[in-house]
Amino acid sequence: MNSMSITKKDLPVSPERREELSIFCRERTVSGLLKILGNITDVLRSDYLDKTLPMPDRAIRNLRVMPLAWRIALRLSCLSVAMEAMRGCHRKNIAACYPWRAGLAFSHSFFQLGIGQHLHIGLKRNEEEPHQTGEIYLPLVTSKFNGHIDRVIISDPMLATGGSFVTVIEQLLEFFPPEKIILASVVAAPEGIFNLANLYPGIKVISAALDSHLNELGYIQPGLGDAGDKFFDRVDLEYFQQVKSIFSSEEWLLLVRKIQEANPVD
């Protein structure tokens, strides 16, 4: 297979290429470097796949499914992925890394499972190239790397082209070898799996679902819609009170601002 990364200008890939990617993912599964749990709940896709609902609202909001119900369903998927990602490693020697905003969907799961460290990195989307990282507005706090860490789990519900994961991996490689890094998602696309394996052959990916492909806009098909927008849809600060201890005071204030931006008062 051509080893060149698949970018937005290459989308959608041809049917022949799609079949090659499918075979590639099966081979990664056999090798143990890709684990698909296959346990995503229907409610996560319900609004987005209902073509009677208007776009883009159904991609960025929860319309017929209550927002809290959607977040609970997402948390269940995140929990199963988190448990698999932690397998074989003592929880206190694990760090979870959350790319903001969507990555925070995993925060309750890793908090509940009692891992040792929680790391945050804020990525701003490039609006001209939506699936490329524009800038890092919340850098990793390197002083948090204390004690012995055997595994770092980068957690983001959506793995599309893999651009956000690449940005975070490059930050973490300054401190950890690739074999200590695992990628955790809820929905992944074959194009993203291929891109990441091409750059980092030894890094393992765990996902609740492996979807079909990316469309011409770089959105996962069938997908969930925009996981970050849907996760923050009508959320309030109370939702995060249980996990407040994983945030620094500066990170908490930034979270407050993100919630306000996502839910402006009319």
Image (cartoon, grey):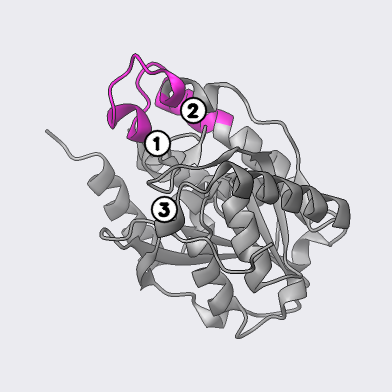
Cα separation between marks 1 and 3: 11 Å
Whether 247 is drawn above or below 172: the answer is above
- Can see residue 248? no
| Residue toward you, 103 or 23 | 23
The kind of residue tagged 3 is Arg
Query: What percent of the width, then of the height, locates residue 79?
Result: 67, 41
255 vs 127, left or right, is: right
Whether 224 is drawn above or below 186: the answer is above
Q: Which residue is mark 2?
A: 70
**Marks 2 and 1 in Cβ contact (< 8 Å):** yes
Q: Which residue is mark 3?
A: 101
Cα separation between marks 3 and 2: 16 Å
58 vs 34, left or right, is: left
Q: Which residues are magenta?
A: 48-73
Q: Which residue is mark 1?
A: 230
Classed neighbour count for the residue bearing mark 3: other residues with Cα under 10 Å, few (<14), some (14–19), many (≥20): many
Ranked by sequence position, the earlier of labels 1 and 3 is 3
Cα separation between marks 2 and 1: 8 Å
> Is 7 included in the stretch rendered in magenta?
no
The kind of residue tagged 2 is Trp
Query: Quick one: SS at disc 1?
Result: helix
**Marks 3 and 2 in Cβ contact (< 8 Å):** no
| Residue toward you, 194 or 119 | 194
Name the residue at 36% across, 55% down.
255
